[in-house]
Amino acid sequence: MKQKLIVEGHNDILVISHLLMAKNLRITGYNTKERYEKEFVSIGTGKSNNDGGKENALKAFKAALKTEELDRIGLVVDADSETANPAIDTWRSIRNILQQNGYQNLPAEPNPSGTIIAETDKALIGVWIMPNNDSEGYLEHFFEGLINPNDEFLEEARRITEGFVSDERNRFSPTHQQKAKIRTWLAWQDDPESPMGLALRDYPRLGYMSLDTPLVESFYDWLQLCFDTYVE
Amino acid sequence: MLDHLHIKNYRLFHDLRIDTLGQVNLIAGKNNTGKTALLEAIRIVLSQEDIYEFRDEISLIITRRGDDTSTDVFGTIFNDFNQNVAINNVQISATRPRRLLVNHEGAEIVNGREQTADGLNFDYSARERINNHFTFVSIGIDSVLNDIFWQETALTSKEDDLIEILKVIDTRIKRINVNSNNTKVQLNDYDKPIPLKNLGDGANRLLTLALALVNSKNKVLLIDEFEVGLHHSIQEQLWDMIFKYAELLNIQVFVTTHSQDTVQAFYRAAVKTSQYRAMANYFTLHRKGAGDVKAIIYDLDEIETALLTNIEIR
């Protein structure tokens, strides 16, 4: 079975692979690191921009559909920002791509637990719109949902980053406030260099984060519906 | 120039339509998707004499547009068979499959010899590889083809073109003497002939491709399994040469490949000028399960996306 996960950037890959590892979940057929990284995942990379991005991820999604070689395709992209219905507007552009490729029974709105499209003789499609298939945001919003809600450092990181923005002392773009906040929080933990992926390996065990929140459970369910997986 | 192709009931093609052909076409696809058979079909549609040999033996409909020269020939030869003749649109249908081809020694190659659709070993005679309409370069090194083409090349301006192409493998190459299995070159600053094969494994394959290219003026050049024997590092430069001479000598090129490196080299050469962009055409032959083979055409932007994002399109 040929399977492919398309995401916007490297951080998405690291977070998702650490989530899989945390539950000993493996993607059938892609159980080595090399096959996982070289064949299973695709990052939306553009010619002039190596950081990926939604537009490039959607181009990759189109190309993956066109090949007709894949049995299952998963797509994880961020919700649109600056629109009234962030997740719905993102879903509409994905829906158009699917329609152009002959998919017929497509819901008007994304499923809050992650969307799965299964049609006869076509690749099974899974779509997850970060952070929760509903609100505006990106991976760092999803990540925040795993930190204990009453974590004192999280509260402090929020206060400080918000303060920079409200005082107009921020060097980062206001749309990146959440990225600044999460990295601030990460910098204050046991390993200040630890990125989001590694944090998921270490901090649930130390009690700073939890992989049992409803949002993560939905994400795990979606991953297992979208891909052929097994528990090692 | 062939501008589209429709193949019906030939080998594993039930009804294959390729609506867009370019001047330089790269064809990829997995095993058993019919890449070599497609080159054969093009050979047949281009070959007037061969059609007669094929008359009894195969079942095919090939539609051709944009070239009037062969229309009458098809019309007459296949008079007795199911046929449809329209203006600029010939359909040929012969319905008694028995033999596939007779090779130059007269031995029959029968259907039973077909092991894989890709791996048919036709023993093409020189006449079946070169005629007024096409040049066919099969897998491997072809010293017969080399010698025939060298006769046409030596001491003409084509020799300069040949040297230019050979510089892809070694920029020091100054002169060449092609002689079956003992081809020698002279390098700059070295006054002694050295065997071409000393320049690396790819040198002999490159020679065959280069000779075929400079001798295909106003013809169709068919190359099966481009990457065989060619190191990936020289493929892009060789594509540069293919585009250059295809344009210069009015050659329509069809190349098959298995290799992602070849797709990448083709892409990199094609995006260099707007002229090459317009000439380039890439498609894959795709077969789902035991279903029909179909062609999927990708534009250069889609190739770029696929190469950058690790999506396999070959």
Image (tube, coloured by chain):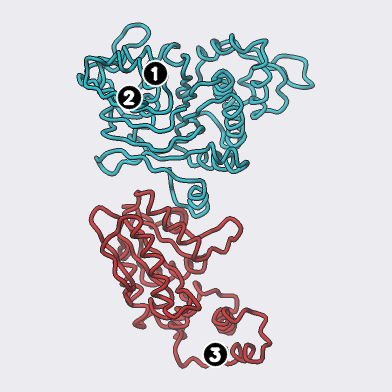
Chain colours: A red, B cyan
Whether tag 1 and tag 2 are in contact, CB under 8 A, the answer is yes
Crowding near pointer 2: few (<14 within 10 Å), some, many (20+)? many
Residue at which label 1 appears: B70
**Which-is-in-front pick, marks 2 and 3?**
2
Q: Can I make out residue A98 in this image? A: yes
**Residue under the image location 34 percent in, 36 percent down:** B17
Residue B49: % across, % down: 37, 12
Q: Nearer the viewer, residue A36 or A130?
A: A130
Residue A210: % across, % down: 41, 83
Q: Which chain does the numbered disc 2 sit on?
A: B
* Mark 1: amino acid: Ser
Pointer 1 and pointer 2 on the same chain: yes
Residue A120: % across, % down: 23, 56
Residue lying farthest to the left in this orientation = B96
Crowding near pointer 3: few (<14 within 10 Å), some, many (20+)? some
**Residue under the image location 40 percent in, 40 percent down:** B284
Where A62 sits versus B159, above or below?
A: below
Q: Secondary structure at mark 2?
A: strand
Crowding near pointer 1: few (<14 within 10 Å), some, many (20+)? some
Q: CA distance from mark 3 to mark 1?
A: 80 Å
Residue at which label 2 appears: B90
Whether tag 2 and tag 3 are in contact, CB under 8 A, the answer is no
Q: Secondary structure at mark 3?
A: helix
Quadrant position of residue B203: top right
Where B50 sits versus A69, above or below?
A: above
Say which mark, if any, is on residue A153: 3
